[in-house]
Image: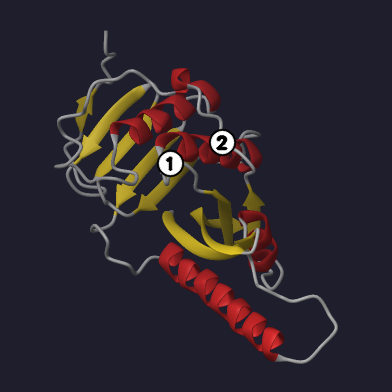
Amino acid sequence: MDFTSFSLEAAKDGEDRMVYVQDLILVMEFIEEGQRRTEYIDYICDAKDNNKNDFFFVLYVFILFFSTYFISGGFDSIEIWSDGGPHHFKTRFCQWTWHHLSSLFFSSKRITHNFFASYHGHSLADAHAATDKRLLRDAYNASQHDRLSVTEASLNFGPSSAQDLSVLLSSPASRTSVFHLPSIPRDPELRPHILPLSLIKSKHSFVYENGACYAVEQTNKGPDQRFFFHTLV
C-alpha cells in the first residue's frame, strides 16, 4: 500500500482554482483456485483543510477495505507491505489499528506489517500510482486538444474533482477498483489515546496475533520483542 495525490484544475465563477485529491492505493496479491491473482484498489477523496493522508482518512479506508474483502473470513493471515516513511504508515496509530482489527474482527488471526526502505519507490503500488498519473496526464492532453478544436460540443476541461477522477481511473482498468469517498468521518473520539511507541523507528516488522503485539528488527527475523499499547490518561 502507498499514498499518491493529484492536483486538478477546476474553473468556478470564471476563475481557475486547484483541487487536491488524495489516493490510498492498496494492491492485493492472493492465491485463488491455484492461480496467483493481483488486484489494484484506489480509495480517493478531495483533500480538504490540509488533512492529506491523516489518521482519519487511513482509518476510514482500512475499515471499508477490510469490511469489503476480509470480514467473512476465508484467510489464514494477512501480510502487509508499505513504505517506511514516518509520516505514512509507520505510526503508533496505524499499528494500533492492525491490533484492533485482528483482535476484534478477525478472531485474533495474524496481521503482519512489513516495511520497505523509506521512499524506495519501486513497489507494485508505486507502479500503479505512475499508471494513474499517466491516465490523468493523457486526459488533460485530450482536453487541451478538444478546446483548440472548432466544435459546438461542450468544452472538455478534464477531471476537476475526486468524483471525475474516480471515473477516469476505473474506466480502462480490468483489475482496478476505484472507490470515491465523498467525506471522511473526523470525530476526535475515533483517534485512540495512546502513548508513542519507543521502538517504532528501530523495528521494521510488526506482528499482531492472538491478542499480542510483537516487533521485529527485520522481516521474518527473530527474536520478537513483545510490546503493549499504553493509554494516555
Q: Out of 25 and 168, give the one closest to the viewer.
A: 168
Q: Are marks 2 and 1 in contact (CB under 8 Å)?
A: yes
Q: Residue at x 71, y 69 (%)?
A: 171
Image quarter (top left, top right, bottom left or bottom right) of the C terminus: top left
Residue marked by disc 1: 51
Bin the neighbour count of mark 2 within 10 Å (Cα to Cα): few under 14, some 14-19, many 20 and up: some
Residue 117, image x, y percentages = 23, 58
Q: Is residue 106 visible?
A: yes
Bin the neighbour count of mark 1 within 10 Å (Cα to Cα): few under 14, some 14-19, many 20 and up: few
On the image, which quarter does residue 193 sit in? top left
Q: Out of 126 and 141, give the one closest to the viewer.
A: 141
Vertical position of residue 119 compared to residue 99: above or below: below
SS at mark 1 in the image = loop
| 3 left or right, relative to 69 | left
Residue found at the very far front of the displayed protein: 14
What's the distance in space between the residues labelled 2 and 1, CA to CA?
A: 10 Å
Residue 82, image x, y percentages = 36, 53
Image quarter (top left, top right, bottom left or bottom right) of the N terminus: bottom left
Residue 120, image x, y percentages = 27, 65
Vertical position of residue 228 compared to residue 44: above or below: above
SS at mark 2 in the image = loop
Tag 2: residue type? Ile
| 24 left or right, relative to 194 | right
Residue 60, image x, y percentages = 53, 36
Vertical position of residue 165 compared to residue 114: above or below: below
| 87 left or right, relative to 169 | left
Residue 184 is marked as 2
Q: Out of 199 and 50, give the one closest to the viewer.
A: 50
Tag 1: residue type? Asn
Q: Residue at x 43, y 41 (%)?
A: 51
Q: Residue at x 41, y 48 (%)?
A: 80
